[in-house]
Image (cartoon, helix red, strand yellow):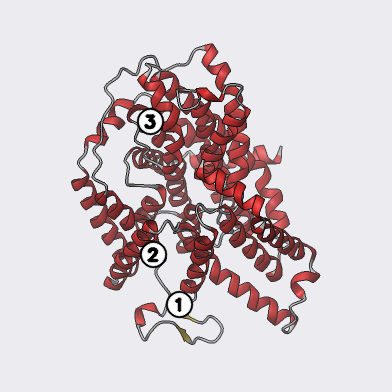
Amino acid sequence: METLGLLGHGLFVVLTPENLLLCLLGAVFGTLIGVLPGLGPVATISLLMPITFSLDPIGAIIMLSGIYYGAQYGGSTTAILVNIPGESTSVVTAIDGYKMAQQGRAGDALAIAAIGSFIAGCFGTLIIAFAGPPLAKVAQQFTSPEYFSLMVFGLVAAVVLANGSLISALAMIFLGLLLGMVGMDVNTGAARMTFGLIELSDGISFVAMALGLFGVAEVICNLEDAATRGLNSSRIGRIWPTRDVLKSARGAIARGTLLGSLFGILPGGGATMASFSSYALEKRVAKDRSRFGRGAIEGVAGPEAANNAAAQTSFIPLLTMGLPTSATMALMIGALTLHGIAPGPNVIVRQPDLFWGLIVSMFVGNVMLVIINLPMIGLWVKLLQIPYRLLFLFIVVISAIGVYSVNNSPFDIYLMIGFGLLGYLLRKFNAEPAPMLMGFVLGPMLEENFRRAMLTSRGDLMIFVERPISLGLLIISVLLIISIALPSVRAGREDVFQE
């Protein structure tokens, strides 16, 4: 009953003209970047973060979160109709969704994608509402040793669940940790790795780094790809599934929702991992696997439910423990910090309007997304006809303006360009940049909590194993490291990523 009362309070927060408008803008922007290839939630949130400085913190986080889960909706539309996944989470949806469109069943695929996304999104939001406060109470018992061990667990899990080579994931984590140390030492005030540049005294700009790695690098990769966009002119048909289609998809939606909810909570998981895992699960439980890749409705329903559930539940560790589970959540931490809010267990107590307002805005945003996506399918597909030579110029110019506006420093633009080139090279060598961003965000917190623990214990490292929660997190981290060292586990991991 208490939770329902707090949800009512969150509804009161959201139902203001300004917050409703920002929720709508987030849903529209999210759908737009999901539709257009070459954009993504990480780059777009980085781009819009400076614009939110003038907004109320609640409105800012409502809009930025709407962009994130809205992108999961938009990506499925073009993946199904024109075989162009606008978002990485929709790559799997395109496999069977586009085949359904070619068979004249585009309406069924679009409707199931929307229904599955809506159900999973609402379920994930309910998990936040009911599981968030108890987890926050547990996290309030955390002190420096527990937070240090939690950060270690987050980094280890990010390595295990990162796509590609384990060596490259480890290298990215350590590079992120190293970059996070640039600037003035918190305790001594000494300059570290600034190379005499006064612009680096406050550290590397988070916005410049994120926009470079995920925005500029993505633009370069898209300019290099000369592939043309071929639009499918087939009729969409009736956008409402029959009873038989709903019956075939309901099991996949349920499994995808549960699986995505789990992957959203895990560090390093995220919506992309959830959608790929859901597709692999549906193939394994299907009686006739040969249907997959030829228009199986389960191949649309499962991944779409999984990526939306993961997008919602990834806010749980962010809001209750201050732990980002993906690059997008790392950006959310940056956005909250820039607004003077420290993510963690005290958010629910000190910022109840933000926590419960955000939860209710997710329900409202999911309803808006269903209304926005299905009736406006024709408009979203038309947007694919925008020449990329015009689109990329807009992205680069707005990115430069956004980065400059944070500190009014031309140096940050040079940083963005440098990280853009680095991100491009990382993609060429199949190294995922997301673990580097997580290492960059978690590194300073890891160092700060380690130093605090050492001051408390007078240099005794046993403090990390004497406290039960800290010991438990370290044991789990060690078990994860041991597991990925086993040949059978490593081979299974590689098979999953390859599939």
Marks 3/2: CA–CA distance: 30 Å
The amino acid sitting under disc 3 is Thr
Name the residue carrying label 2.
209
Q: Is residue 219 positioned above or below 380 on the image?
A: below
Q: Residue at x 59, y 55 (%)?
A: 160
* Mark 1 nearby-residue class (10 Å; few <14, some 14–19, many ≥20): some
Provide residue 164's location: percent of width, then percent of height: 50, 53
- Name the amino acid, label 2: Met
Residue bearing the label numbered 1: 182
Dots 2 and 1: beta carbons under 8 Å? Answer: no
Which residue is drawn at the image coordinates 49% and 23% (left, top)?
296
The residue at the point 72 percent across, 79 percent down is 456
**Residue type for callout 1:** Val
Label 1 sits on a secondary structure element that is loop
In this view, the residue in front, 212 or 362, is: 212
Query: Dividing the picture into quarters, in which one does residue 195 lie?
Result: bottom left
Identify whether 128 is placed above or below 245: below
Determine whether the residue tagged by mark 3 lies in a helix, strand or loop.
helix
Mark 2–mark 1 Cα distance, whole angstroms, equals 13 Å
